[in-house]
Image (cartoon, rainbow, N blue to C red):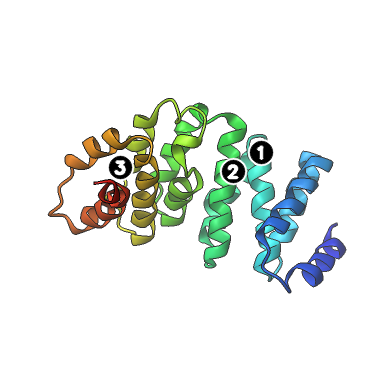
Amino acid sequence: MYRSKIQELEMSLVQIENLPLIRKYAQEFYKTHSLEDCWQFACESWESTYFQIQEISVFLCGYIAHQSAAATLFLKDTVSQHPDWRVQEVLAMAFDAYCKSIGYENSLQIINEWISSDNHNNRRAVTEGLRVWTSRPFFSENPQIAISILSSLKEDNSLYVRKSVGNALRDISKKHRELIEQELFSWDLSNKKIQQVYKLAHKYLDKQG
């Protein structure tokens, strides 16, 4: 149905690596097409061999996920398996778009579902996608909930996830120093995984003295 359009995009977009342009295209498509058309285009563009076109698919799924269980599952079960880190960055953005659509307070269930996933890309999509956590509605008023969610992954098996967790906690420490200090004080630093996260999370606090 959209093969000719996808071929046009492949000719124009694969020569550059311009994420804002790709996101803008997906946003415009979402605003001007039906849910069914968005899902169809997402499915077809995902079949492209070019990651730039696949990113359009991921963005679109993030925009329609609040209305489409199929799109939500596609993000969680299919996109998370993609080997390209650039696609995984877009997965994080798509997850945030979904949470924004349904409201961050209403997202706690799916946040907990994804951070409990066996796939580290799912877990990282949550920790990275919602940065800066305390700039998001609900979490801005409930920073302790954000800290608790992130801290639950402090000894994650994936360094990829642990780095994201540490950096996200560091972000929060800029406005909520005491809460982060209180959380970090309780950590077992004899655990090397936790120690790695601690160093990242404490980085801003070290600068402030």
Is residue 84 shown above or below 197?
Answer: below
Q: Which mark is residue 151?
A: 3
Q: Looking at this view, is 10 or 147 the one in front?
A: 147
Looking at the rendered structure, which numbered label has been put on residue 68? 1
Q: Which residue is mark 2?
A: 72
The residue at the far bottom in this view is 15
Which residue corresponds to the image point at 45% horizontal and 32% vertical from the top-left? 108
Q: CA distance from mark 1 to mark 2?
A: 7 Å
Task: Determine whether the residue tagged by mark 2 lies in a helix, strand or loop.
Answer: helix
- Residue at 84 percent of width and 67 percent of height: 8
Q: Tell me the crowding category of disc 3: few under 14, some 14 to 19, or many 20 or more residues within 10 angstroms, Cα based.
A: many
Of badges 1 and 3, nearer the viewer stands 3
Amino acid carrying mark 3 in the image:
Ser
- Image coordinates of residue 114 in percent, x first then y, are 45, 44
Q: Nearer the viewer, residue 128 or 116?
A: 128
Residue at point 74%, 51% (across, down): 24
Name the side, left or right, on which 136 lies relative to 47: left
Sooner in the amino-acid sequence: mark 3 or mark 2: 2
Residue 138 in view in this figure: yes
- Residue type marked 2: Thr
Of the two numbered discs 3 and 2 in the rendering, the one whose residue sits closer to the viewer:
3
